[in-house]
Image (cartoon, rainbow, N blue to C red):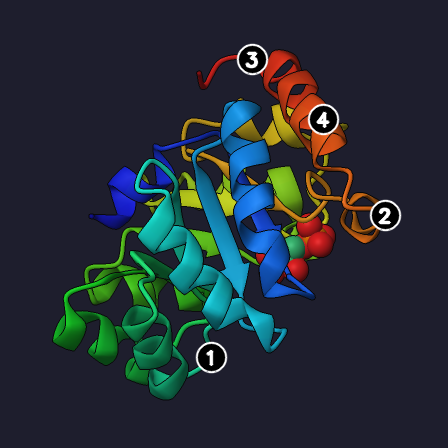
């Protein structure tokens, strides 16, 4: 799957840090029921890799990738566990090299023009803007549209329902990611129904990119 295809799956990319691998399937099902067919499961928790494996085996309609992939070893572990794509908060030669070697899409994180140039000059035209609101949010993405008209972005970090439509209104934004769509409290209470409700509400609020 190409990084362009990944970024066109859903306007909302849930960024997830799972505490328990048992929550993986119920959460994936709740998101699908709410109309979201992509998950970025971060490697921030020990349960992350196993969750990727469980979902990729049991629910082919859910596109599951890894997030917080920081180096080649993370990248390989994620792919070995079934990740179909990889998100990183940053960009490095090592990550780009591993993406080519494994032929698995990498969506690297960028926050400056120099990092966009590094991505673009290596053929990575689909990037995450991270941390989106701190890096300049809507305004920096609009500015990147000048020198880098072919680049497409997925802002994450500080994105939520109150600003997502601003981001999605930009031509160079294909989707936006965030943890808000899977609130910690819901996970603590295992309230997966509420997560479905939040997804449905969010998808109704989003205009333009659906
Ligand atoms: C990420 O890795 O994309 C971010 O940690 C998500 O940021 P958020 O928690 O502000 O949505």
Lower sequence index among marks 4 and 1: 1
Work out how far the residue at label 4 is from the one at label 1, CA to CA, in angstroms: 30 Å
Which residue carries the number 1 mark? 70
Asked whether the residues under the numbered discs 4 and 2 touch, taking CB atoms below 8 Å apart as contact, a structural biologist would say no
Which residue carries the number 2 mark? 185
At label 2, counting other C-alpha atoms closer than 10 Å, the crowd grade (few under 14, some 14-19, many 20 or more) is few
Asked whether, in this view, residue 133 is left or right of residue 52, the answer is right
Asked whether, in this view, residue 53 is left or right of residue 5, the answer is right
Quarter of the image that includes the C terminus = top left
Which residue carries the number 3 mark? 207
Q: Quadrant of residue 16?
A: bottom right
Residue 139 x %, y % = 62, 40
Q: Quadrant of residue 72?
A: bottom left
Lower sequence index among marks 1 and 2: 1
Asked whether the residues under the numbered discs 3 and 1 touch, taking CB atoms below 8 Å apart as contact, a structural biologist would say no
- Seen from the viewer's position, the closer of residues 159 and 195 is 195
Lower sequence index among marks 4 and 3: 4
Circle 1 or circle 2, nearest the eye: 2
Work out how far the residue at label 2 is from the one at label 3, CA to CA, in angstroms: 27 Å
Asked if residue 72 is positioned above or below residue 177 in the image, the reply reads: below
Which residue carries the number 4 mark? 198
Secondary element at tag 3:
loop
């Amino acid at each position: 799957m190409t990084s362009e295809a990944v970024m066109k799956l859903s306007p909302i990319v849930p960024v997830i840090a799972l505490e328990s691998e048992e929550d993986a399937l119920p959460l994936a099902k709740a998101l699908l029921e709410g109309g979201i067919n992509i998950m970025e499961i971060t490697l921030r928790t020990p349960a992350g890799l196993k969750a990727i494996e469980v979902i990729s085996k049991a629910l082919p309609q859910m596109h599951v990738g890894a997030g917080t992939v920081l180096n080649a070893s993370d990248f390989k572990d994620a792919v070995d566990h079934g990740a179909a794509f990889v998100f990183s908060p940053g960009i490095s030669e090592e990550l780009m090299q591993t993406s080519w070697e494994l032929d698995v899409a990498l969506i690297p994180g960028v926050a400056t023009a120099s990092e966009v140039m590094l991505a673009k000059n290596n053929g990575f035209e689909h990037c995450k803007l991270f941390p989106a609101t701190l890096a300049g949010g809507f305004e920096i993405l609009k500015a990147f549209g000048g020198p880098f008209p072919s680049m497409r972005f997925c802002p994450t970090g500080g994105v939520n329902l109150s600003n997502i439509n601003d981001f999605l209104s930009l031509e160079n934004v294909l989707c936006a990611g965030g943890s808000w769509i899977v609130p910690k409290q819901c996970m603590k209470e295992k309230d997966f129904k509420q997560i479905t409700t939040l997804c449905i509400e969010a998808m109704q609020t989003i205009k333009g990119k659906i």
